[in-house]
Image: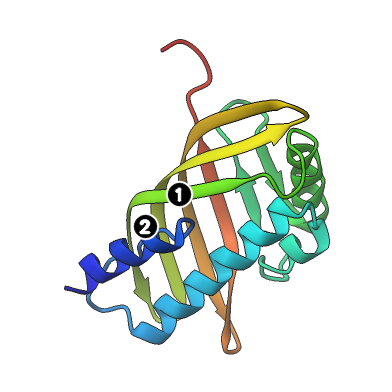
Amino acid sequence: MLKQILIASSLAIGIVPAVANADVDEATVAAIKALWQSQHKALDAHDADALMMTYTDSDDIMLMGTGPGEHWIGQEEIKDAYAHFMEGFDANTMQVECVDGAGSKADTVVWFTAVCSFTDQKAAEQRNYVLNLSAVAVQDGTDWRFHTMHFSHLTGGE
């Protein structure tokens, strides 16, 4: 039942992947939803400082993409990567809907996956694309923060 609630919530909110395991308590699910919302809001607003607040304060945090060279380690590299991502779309134009996802929790670690459809705009040109996402979040006091995030997308062909 919790899995269906999480998936329905992710559809309703549009940016929250499902942490779909009956062992995940409601407080953790709510915290992960808030974390995703904070990250999406910061990315859409082109607020790199706020976006980096969604990551844990650790030297070994990592963001990974699809291809060679698409991996960034540490606060500075990840912030720089997001700054480049933000150049690709106008602020306050991003819409995200995540429909499929799964995940679980063990103590102070949550891991999850999601398939998300994005729409954004640069000048008058609209883009639509799908990303597969996976992430690991760790509990930092009473808050949750991303430690590792991976995204992949179709890079060529059909």
Q: Earlier in the sequence, mark 1 or mark 2?
A: 2
Q: Nearer the viewer, residue 33 or 54?
A: 33
What secondary structure is found at the residue carrying circle 2? helix
Question: Left or right: where does residue 79 sit relative to residue 151?
Answer: right
Which mark, by number, is residue 11?
Answer: 2
Q: Position of residue 19 (x, y in %)?
A: 35, 66
Q: Badge 1, how many Cα within 10 Å: few under 14, some, many 20+?
A: many
Query: Image point 32% across, 78% down: which residue?
Result: 24
- Residue type beneath disc 2: Leu
Question: Left or right: where does residue 124 sit relative to residue 64?
Answer: right
- Residue type beneath disc 1: Glu
Query: Image point 80% across, 58% down: which residue?
Result: 47
What secondary structure is found at the residue carrying circle 1? strand
Query: Image point 30% across, 61% down: which residue?
Result: 7
* Residue located farthest toward the front when viewing the structure as drawn: 124
Tell me whether the residue at label 1 lies in contact with that at label 2, contact meaning CB atoms closer than 8 angstroms.
Answer: yes
* Residue located farthest toward the left when viewing the structure as drawn: 1
Tally of numbered discs: 2
Q: Nearer the viewer, residue 26 or 146?
A: 26
Q: Quadrant of the C terminus?
A: top left
Q: Position of residue 67 (x, y in %)?
A: 58, 26
Q: Position of residue 3 (x, y in %)?
A: 23, 67
Q: Position of residue 60 (x, y in %)?
A: 68, 59
Q: Badge 2, how many Cα within 10 Å: few under 14, some, many 20+?
A: some
Query: Image point 48% across, 70% down: which residue?
Result: 33
Which mark, by number, is residue 19?
Answer: none
- Residue at numbered disc 1: 97
Q: Quadrant of the N terminus?
A: bottom left
Label 1, label 2: how far apart the Cα atoms are = 7 Å
Residue 38, relative to residue 154: is it above or below?
Answer: below
* Residue located farthest toward the bottom when viewing the structure as drawn: 142
